[in-house]
Image: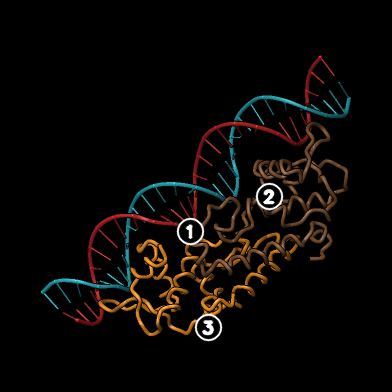
Chain colours: A brown, B orange, C red, D cyan
DNA sequence: CTATTAACCTATTGACAAAGTAGGTAATTA
DNA sequence: TAATTACCTACTTTGTCAATAGGTTAATAG
C-alpha cells in the first residue's frame, strides 16, 4: 500500500505544478492548501529536494519550486523515490536479500508480472497528465 | 505491499493444489515443504477455512484440503481475503471512511485506475494457471 | 544593521500492525 | 485408550508510519 508519504508527495508536486512557474512557493501555503501538517510536509519536501525533484530557497520570498516542467516528471519516479520502492513483494524490492526459493518459486512469475504492470502504469503517467486531467 | 500472510496463503493453496486431490494434508507436511513456521501457518489456514477456501479435518488421517478445483480459485480472492484488501491506497480500501477531498482530489483518478488494473490482473489468474505454469 | 521570513536540521513520540510464539483443548481414528 | 491432528486464546517482539517539538542557518526588506 502506498503510504501518506508517497501520496502527499504526489499532491505537493501537483500543487506546485499548478502554481505560476518560476516562483518559489512557501511550505506554509502548500500545507494550508493541502491540509497537511507543516512539520510532516517538511520531511517529505526534504526527500524531494535531495532527489532533485524540487529546489528550495530560504529567507523572505523563498519557498519551493519544481526543477523541471511538469511533463518531465512521472508519477512512478515521485512515488518510488518517496516510498523507497514500488515493489508489491519484499523479494522484488530494492536491495532485497536474494531469496533461497527463487529458482523454484511458483509465485515469483506472478509477482514479476504484476511488478511490470505497476511500473509501466506509474511511469507512463506524467505530472502534466494529472494536472490537465488526461488521467 | 503484500505481506507474508497473503504470500504464504497463496503458496499454501498452490501446495495443496499440487497434492493428490481428495486427500487431507496435515499442516506439518505443508509447513515443512514450504519452510514456514507451523504455528504461524495455523493462523493463515484458519482464515482460509473461515472463508471456505479450505476444509479441515481433525484426528488421524486429518489435515487440510481444497474445497473446489484449482481452476475455480483466483489469486485475487486468496490475496484479498487474507490481506483484507487489495487497494493500493487507504481511501479505496474496504470500509474506508469517506475522504473529504474526494470530489476535488486530483490523484483519485490515478488510484482508481491502478486499482482496476490490480484487480483485473489478480482476479484473472487462477490457481490452476499458477500450478501448470501458464503464468 | 536588524527584524522578519522561511528553509533546514536533529531528535523524540505514540500508535499500530506484522510476524511469530506458547501452551493448551477438542475431535477423530487405529 | 493412545496417538494424531486440527482448533483456540493469548502474548511478545519488532519495526514502521505518521507526526511533533524545538532549535539553527540563510536570504531579503526596511
Q: Is residue A28 above or below residue A5?
A: above
Question: In 3D space, how far apart are the residues under numbered discs 2 and 1 (Cα atoms)?
Answer: 28 Å
Label 1: few (<14), some (14–19) or many (≥20) C-alpha neighbours in 10 Å: few
Which residue is disc 1 drawn over?
A100
Which residue is disc 3 drawn over?
B71
Residue in front for this viewpoint, A41 or C4: A41
Q: Secondary structure at mark 2?
A: helix
Label 3: few (<14), some (14–19) or many (≥20) C-alpha neighbours in 10 Å: some
Is disc 2 in the same subunit as disc 3? no
The residue that appears at 79% across and 35% down in the rendered structure is A57
Residue in front for this viewpoint, B76 or A111: A111
Q: Earlier in the sequence, mark 2 or mark 1?
A: 2
Q: Quadrant of the C terminus of chain B?
A: bottom right
The x and y percentages for residue B96 are 59, 64
The residue that appears at 67% across and 64% down in the rendered structure is A118
Q: Secondary structure at mark 3?
A: helix
Q: Quadrant of the N terminus of chain B?
A: bottom right
Residue in front for this viewpoint, B120 or B101: B120
Amino acid at each position: 500500500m502506498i503510504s501518506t508519504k508517497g501520496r502527499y508527495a504526489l499532491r505537493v508536486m501537483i500543487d506546485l505544478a499548478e502554481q505560476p512557474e518560476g516562483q518559489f512557493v512557501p511550505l506554509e501555503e502548500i500545507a494550508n492548501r493541502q491540509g497537511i501538517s507543516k512539520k510532516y510536509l517538511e520531511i517529505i519536501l526534504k526527500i524531494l529536494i535531495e532527489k532533485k525533484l524540487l529546489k528550495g530557497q530560504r529567507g523572505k520570498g523563498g519557498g519551493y519550486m519544481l526543477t523541471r516542467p511538469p511533463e518531465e516528471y512521472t508519477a512512478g519516479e515521485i512515488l518510488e523515490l518517496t516510498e523507497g520502492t514500488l515493489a508489491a513483494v519484499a523479494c522484488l524490492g530494492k536491495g532485497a536479500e536474494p531469496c533461497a526459493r527463487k529458482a523454484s518459486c511458483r509465485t515469483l512469475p506472478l509477482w514479476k508480472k504484476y511488478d511490470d504492470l505497476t511500473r509501466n502504469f506509474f511511469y507512463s503517467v506524467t505530472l502534466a497528465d494529472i494536472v490537465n486531467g488526461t488521467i
